[in-house]
Amino acid sequence: MISSTKTDSPRSRSNWLRVLSRFVLCSTLILALSVALKTRSRLSLLLPSFSHHPAVMSYQQERYIAELAVQRACLLTQKVFFEKAKGTVSKDDKSPVTIGDFGAQALIIQAIRKNFPNDEIVGEEEASSLRQDKDLSAEIWRIAKDIKLDDAESDKVLGGPLPSEESMLDIIDQGNSAGGPKGRIWALDPIDGTKGFLRGGQYAVCLGLIVDGDVKVGAIGTPNLPVDDNATIDASTGTQQEGSSTNGILFSAVLGEGATSRPLSTGTLAQSKPISMRPVANIADAVFCEGVEAAHSAQGDNAAVASLLGITAPSVRLDSQAKYCSIARGAGDIYLRLPVKKDYQEKIWDHAAGDILVREAGGQVTDIYGNRLDFSKGRTLAVNKGVVASPKALQDQVIGAVKTVLKL
Ligand SMILES: Nc1ncnc2c1ncn2[C@@H]1O[C@H](COP(=O)(O)O)[C@@H](OP(=O)(O)O)[C@H]1O
Ligand SMILES: [Mg+2]
Ligand SMILES: [Mg+2]
Ligand SMILES: [Mg+2]
């Protein structure tokens, strides 16, 4: 007897085959989608609009461009240093600004403009003094016009060479955003630690992306930090050597995706490794990182906090956001920047990239009261005072000691 429900009839066989082929098709689609999501960073480079889709927005393209732009700017700062191109001007606040600061700002803004034309930029420098000083402008142009990454394709991604001396000045001035709580704003410090740079000590090229007041991406190039995470650093003598492959690190972080580092000179994305802060079981064993310039942070107060916490190891003293970088990779544990002048407002470009790097490496970054740094208030951290950064587990203890010493 032939039943209408018999499963091996030609009709039911073709139904079964149709179900099977749909199943195979769906599985293939799901597999392809998951592969695409996993490799979205690479896809986003091929299809820039892909990374802007809210469902896969993870700032991989921003991180990629920030790393390349910082890497290229470091080539310029190193060239300035080794050519002893010492043109320097004094800003209104008497702080120095060099050919390296101006040139690095021009190259990084060009890269941001090329890739994210609608974003705003808060850059430390502006070109008005260069428009008056034609010799200095010509010297910056002489050096900046030839700077390029070894990899021609990557260099093209950043926009290739700067177009002309005059447009270089205009580009420098595009870092004039007022900042604020809304939109995409890049905070750029073309050379942080200019005094360290001039001394041949530590300095950092720093770039952070702030979106609606919150730091999402950071990249920091430190040409004079040792590649070896455990090497000791002598800040007073400096470590710069021409063509050295033992110095030079590129750090980066994306919110929620961790912090990484790779060698600055030879590094490719593939050589990035995750970094994290050192676990400290007993706070008395912690090592402080602090600045070199006594005018920027109160060293007596820093020492009093260390002693209250029972810390006896000497501080590692470094200019620039190399301090954030050092604690993020476990070469030191606590960064203190206790205020010297009551009315000084920290600048967002001095902290944006370092803040996210340390937080993504397992640390906490606050002001002296224990409040998170607030990047939504314009060009300065107007509602914060000083900076305290340490592994999450230690932060309450450190803030407690800071409050005692500063009588807060
Ligand atoms: N009175 C002050 N207090 C705190 N920071 C100050 C300061 N005067 C200048 N700075 C900032 O300190 C930065 C250097 O920090 P550090 O001392 O940690 O190396 C400088 O960055 P630039 O070198 O980019 O100008 C500058 O913005
Ligand atoms: Mg400066
Ligand atoms: Mg700075
Ligand atoms: Mg600077």
Image: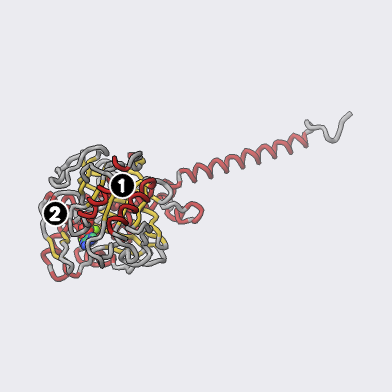
Gap in Å between the C-alphas at discs 1 and 2? Answer: 22 Å
Outermost top residue: 1
- Identify residue for label 2: 198
Q: Which residue is located at x 33 percent, y 50 percent?
A: 398
Q: Is residue 99 left or right of residue 21?
A: left
Q: Which residue is located at x 21 percent, y 39 percent?
A: 232
Identify which amino acid the numbered label 2 is placed on. Answer: Leu
Quadrant for residue 132, please give it.
Answer: bottom left
Q: Can residue 369 be seen from the camera position used here?
A: yes
Q: Is residue 207 left or right of residue 37?
A: left
Secondary structure of residue under mark 1: strand
- Identify residue for label 1: 251
Q: Is residue 287 left or right of residue 56?
A: left
Q: Nearer the viewer, residue 212 or 234?
A: 234
Label 2: few (<14), some (14–19) or many (≥20) C-alpha neighbours in 10 Å: some
Residue 406 in the image, given as x and y percentages of width and height: 28, 58
Quadrant for residue 4, please give it.
Answer: top right
Q: How many numbered marks, from 0 up? A: 2
Compared with 282, 155 (above or below) is: below
Residue 127 in the image, given as x and y percentages of width and height: 20, 67
Q: Quadrant of ligand 1?
A: bottom left
Q: Nearer the viewer, residue 203 or 43?
A: 203
Q: Nearer the viewer, residue 206 or 129?
A: 206
Compared with 95, 390 (above or below) is: above
Q: Which residue is located at x 11 percent, y 51 percent?
A: 83
Outermost right residue: 1
Q: Is residue 328 left or right of residue 36?
A: left
Residue 239 in the image, given as x and y percentages of width and height: 16, 44
Any mark on residue 20, and which? none
